[in-house]
Structure formats: C-alpha cells, structure tokens
Amino acid sequence: MKHIDRREFMKVAAATGAAMSMRIGLQAQTEKMHQRTMPSTGQQIGSVGFGNATPFHEPSAQNQATTRELIGLLLEHGGNFIDTNVPTVWAFEESLDVDTLKQLQVLTSVTERGASVVETDMDHLYAALEKKPLDFLQLRNMFSLSAMDQWPMLKEWKAAGYVKHIGLSGVRAEQPETVAMYEKYINDGVDFIQINYSFTESEAEKRLLPMARDNGVGVITNRPFRNGNYFSLVSGKQLPDWVKEFDCESWAQLSVKWALSNPAVTCVITESSDPGHAIDNLRSGFGRLPDENQRQEVSNLIHTFL
C-alpha cells in the first residue's frame, strides 16, 4: 500500500467531497474539551493532548512561531497536557511566556541515565516551568534493567513532593514483555501508564486497560494514527454519515474519539506540526463519544479497509 501522509490525505479528501467540516473559528468559546480525572489525585487534564511535535524541539524562528501557535491552540481549546522531553522544555523557554508555561501540564521522562543527570534536569524543569511539584514524570524504556533501577528514585521524589504523578511508558501493547512489566509494577506506586491504542492496535484492551482501571491507574494513549499510516488506510474513503451521531467531523477524529470512548483512557496524545491538523485533533475532545455499539461499528468499518 502506498503511504499517504496526512497533508496529501486532506487534499484527496477535499477532492472527493469528504473534507472535514472543522469549525475553525470555534465553538471553543462556547464549548469545552472534555476533562478527565487522574484516579490517584483527582487532578483534571484535557482529554486530548500533544506529543513532542517537530517545531517544539528543532530551534528556528519559524518553529518558535509555530510552537506558540500550537500551544495557543491547545490552551484555547481547553487542553493542557503535553508529553515532551527536557530539552524541549528548554526550547519552550525561548518560545513561550511564563504565564503560558504555567498553564501546561507537562509530562517528561526519565531513562537509564544516572541519577545526578536526572536531578540536574529536574532542577531546570522547576526553573523553566516555575512549578513545583511537577505534574507528571514517567520512566521510559522500562524494559531496560538500568532504567527500572530508577523507579525507587521516582517514588522517593513523589513522596518528597517534587512531582505529583509518576508512571511507566512501555513500547507496544502487543508485546508480552510489556504486559508482564506493567503487571509487575502496577501496584508499586504507579499513577499512570502510557501505551499505544487505536482500533488497528487494540491489544491494550485485552489486559492492560482493564488492569489499569481496576487498580485506579490513569492511561495515556499514543499512536492514534499509527505514525500516519492510518491516513493511507482511509484515503479515498467516504466518512459515513452515521459518525455525526457522536459529533465526529473527520477521519482523524474518528480514531481519537474511538480511543477516548474507552472509559479506562485518561488522555490521547496526538502529534502534528500543522495548526489545522492540530485543531482537528483537539476537536476530538468535544461533543459526544461513541457508545459500545458504535465503537463496534467503527471497528467493523475500519477492518473492512485492512
């Protein structure tokens, strides 16, 4: 199958009369993005967030301007959650004013680097965000034994009031070792997990999502568009009229809304450097979500394209 990126997909959709009906000037002024609750603390976060888009971490005057626009759109639509890394937060200092930074709930990661390096990073985050405790800190690359050696340190930092939520980020939900590691640590102070989840990568439904919900653990999901491959799958296809029943305006929103309609999911992170695409993604957090029967209809539809 030929790969079609989202920009090309949107051109094809427009040509076939299936262009999304985004309300860009926005009902955002009268509507509000759904907020979800972190089970362990009751803290509210926007149900749709951002990943580490290219403009955030590649310095240039144009990227700084795009960063300001993207973050502005996130906040304007009622979102606030962003998963990024320490160098990107440093870059944010060049692009964003302090008041904007304070509104963000930033998730950053710890890997297998030494504790002293991580502590230095944390000190810079406190200064950059002017926020202590930090909102979210996750242990990435959890299959590395040296990385998991850092987990007691994260628990200590949370106990000392340096961070509100600590969590684990796996690789892929379909890998048995992912499930095994989450099962091992799920009751060891984990506030949230991050995992891939979409109707074409739905393995997390089997064990991980029920396990998280049963144990009061939040879930951040990623890859709603399978790194863009999803748009190749639906290219040239007509979006069915029945998706309007749950306020869906585009193929992108169909994927995000489907993931959000699982009650175990706290936030879906999307990633785009294009402000128009970002608006479309953020709109997924507005309006109704598919019910159980509609979720099955969506799954059936998508699997006819596979």
Image (tube, rainbow, N blue to C red):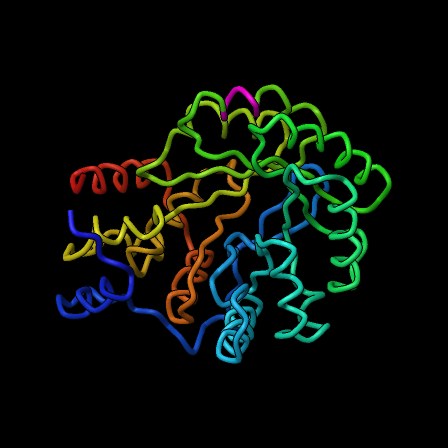
Name the residue: 21% across, 42% down.
301
Corner quadrant of residue 277: bottom left
Q: Residue 37, image x and y in percent?
A: 63, 45
Q: Residue 109, image x and y in percent?
A: 63, 45
Name the residue: 23% across, 62% down.
9
Is residue 77 in view?
no
Q: Residue 149, image x and y in percent?
A: 70, 28
Q: Is residue 179 magenta?
A: yes
Q: Please give the range of residues in magenta.
A: 178-182
Name the residue: 52% across, 60% down.
33
Report the front residue among 2 and 207: 2
Report the front residue among 61 and 34: 61
Report the front residue among 251 and 175: 175
Q: Is residue 124 left or right of residue 269?
A: right
Q: Is residue 201 left or right of residue 40?
A: left
Q: Residue 28, image x and y in percent?
A: 49, 70
In the rendered view, tell whether residue 112 sits above or below residue 93: above
Residue furthest out toward the right: 160
Name the residue: 38% across, 71% down.
276
In this figure, what is the number of numbered marks?
0
In the rendered view, tell whether residue 234 sits above or below residue 215: below
Q: Is residue 157 left or right of residue 136?
A: right
Corner quadrant of residue 183: top right
Q: Is residue 45 left or right of residue 15?
A: right
Q: Is residue 139 magenta?
A: no
Is residue 170 in view?
yes
- Quadrant in the picture for the C terminus: top left
**Magenta span: chief secondary structure:** helix
Report the front residue among 223 and 238: 223
